[in-house]
Structure formats: structure tokens, C-alpha cells
Amino acid sequence: MNPQLAGHETFYPRGNWLHKGLVAVQENPTLFSRAFPYPTDWLGVGVNMAKSIRHWLSVLSLIEPAEQGHIPTKFARMLLKCDPDLEHPTTLWVLQYKLVSQPTQATTWHWLFTKSGLVSFTREQFMARYLEFLHSASRRKIAARSVERDFQVLTRMYLPPEQRRGSSDDNFYPSAFAKLGMLSHSKLTARFTRNRNLPIPAAAFLYCLLDLRQRSFPDAAVLDLEKVAAAEGSPFGAFLLETGQFLELYQDLPAKIRKKIVLSSTAGMRTLQVGNISPRDVLEVAYSERRYVSLVG
């Protein structure tokens, strides 16, 4: 394993950075290449911020290298088609899962949400456990200072404004991901907590399940939910969801999707028959239902 830390230039994805950067790459594939010397002017941000935007677009699977620079991924093109402003609540949840599914590109995020087992922790506990993991997973020496920077960006990325510690700019340029409610912090105990009972849309969670299926259970037409929950990178672990809670989400799925899948519970075993439905099928149906409250504004 080759862990990757930093790259974000100490910035989390601010406000409309993802939309701004993705549209800019779509219009100008050379934006982040050496052939184009003015990405800061195009994006209207400073040099480090432009580097950060490129980083987040990459680790969120929104752009990929191309002959002339970068182009939107197939996934990103689908998002722009179905959710042109990236405002649908499903979008942020899916992007969150994309992020934590990157063990080598977004190692810190992947480790905390899918591998660490940490639910309530102090900064010191996080640092000790994560450095231990990094030293066992990588042959190269990783500086504690790099881990500290990742920790600061990660926590500021998810905490609500009133709990966030960082520069004063954080109050003026909030993180798009803070509204997901993934983390909270207590000043009294100095502990961070990964929150449960998250308001993840049913279609977003099913997308994540099917995305994991494509990577880990490609031939499975029927998913054993307990087995899926125990798999590395499972959305059950990433969002601290119990398999029994999926029943409630299942009832909230659009009728067009429920017709294509079958949830069964027999002798304590919960299974999901998914047939040939794809992650893209789920998102297209979800985005066709435009009754939502934006998480981005």
C-alpha cells in the first residue's frame, strides 16, 4: 500500500469549488496542465487553492488524466447531466462514499471511515492509532506533521461551523460536506464523534451498496447484507448503519427502484436481490425526482 496524505494544500472543498472546477475542466481540459499557465485566473482563486481544487476533483473521482490534461470522468459527466449544479442531496452522499473508497488517494479519509473502528476519539487517540496503521502499511516514513494536517482538514471539513476550529475564513467559506453531519465535537470532553442515524437518502445508500458490489462481489445477484456489512469499504461501516436499518431505507426507495430489487429476511438472514440493476440506474431515478432541499446552498 502506498498511502497518500496532503495534496489538499490544507483546504477542504469549499462552497462551490467542486462545481466550479468540474465545469472549468469540461470547458478547458488543459486547465491543470503545464500547457495552461493561468488556472488561478480562470478559477478566480489563489495558486494553492487551485491545486486544492484539482486534488479534490481527483480524489472524488470527478476528473481523470487525459492526453491534454484532464477530463471529467464518466461518473462526473453523469452527475452534470442529472444534477447540473451539484445541488441534489444525493450527490454529496455519493461523493462522500467515493472519497472514503480511495485507500491510496485519500488514505486518511478511507482509514477513519472504513478501517479504524473509531467512533468517539480525541485528537491524540486519532494520531496514535493512525500513525501506527501507517507505519505498518507503508515502508516509507510518514511525518506526524503530515498526519496532523490531514486531521485538521478532515475535522474542519465535516464539523458544523459552531464546532469548527481553524482559520477565520472557515466561517466565510463553509465546507459543502459539513451539512452531512458526519462528525461532531465536544469542547467539554475534547472528543470527536462519528454520528449515527445520518439522514442519507435511500437511493444514495443503495448506490453505495451497488458500487461496492461491482468492486467486491461482481458476480453476486443476491447480496448477503451481513457479509456486505463486514466487507472492507462497506457503506454500512462508512455511514455507521446497521443492516436492520436498511429496511427503513428500502421502504423510502422510489417505486421504480423497488420493483427491480427484492429485500428478504429469513431466519435472521437479510438478503438483497439486485439482479442487473446498476449504480447508474439508481442515480438516474433518484435525480428524476426533483422534490428536494439543497444541501449545498
Image: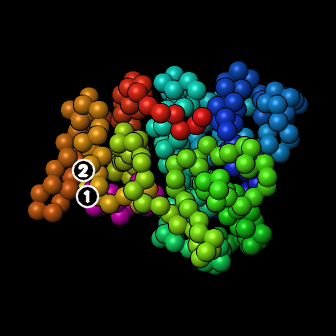
Task: Looking at the picture, tell me which residue is in the foreground, 68 or 132.
Answer: 132
Q: Which mark is residue 216?
A: none
Q: Which residue is drawn at 36% across and 39% down?
A: 203
Does the magenta-highlighted stretch encompass residue 233?
yes
Residue 68 appears in the picture as rendered: no
Indicate the position of residue 104 as horizontal and vertical percent values.
61, 56
Q: What kind of secondary structure does the magenta stretch mostly adopt?
A: helix
* Image height of 34 relative to 131, above or below: above
* Residue shown at 62% from the left, 30% from the top: 72
Residue 240: x and y, percent? 41, 60
Looking at the picture, how far across and down is residue 144, in whole percent? 74, 73
How many other residues sit within 10 Å of disc 1, few (<14), some (14-19) or many (≥20)? few
Magenta residue span: 225-238
Q: Among all residues in the image, which is located at the extreme right? A: 37
**Residue at the spot 26% in from the left edge and 58% down from the top edge:** 244
Asked if residue 40 lies left or right of residue 26, the reply is right
Residue carrying label 1: 244
Q: Is residue 116 left or right of residue 131?
A: left
Does dot 2 land on a helix, a strand or a loop? helix
Against 183, is 41 above or below? above
| Number of marks present in the image shown | 2
Residue beneath disc 2: 247
Residue drawn 70% across the image and 21% down it:
27
Could you tell me if the residues under marks 2 and 1 are in contact, i.e. CB atoms within 8 Å?
Answer: yes
Q: In which quarter of the image is residue 3?
A: bottom right
Residue 253 within the segment the image draws in magenta: no
User: Callout 2: few (<14), some (14-19), or many (20+) C-alpha neighbours within 10 Å?
Assistant: some
Q: In this view, does 27 lie above or below 260?
A: above
Tell me which amino acid carries mark 2. Leu
Kind of residue sitting beneath label 1: Gly
Report which quarter residue 287 is drawn in: top left
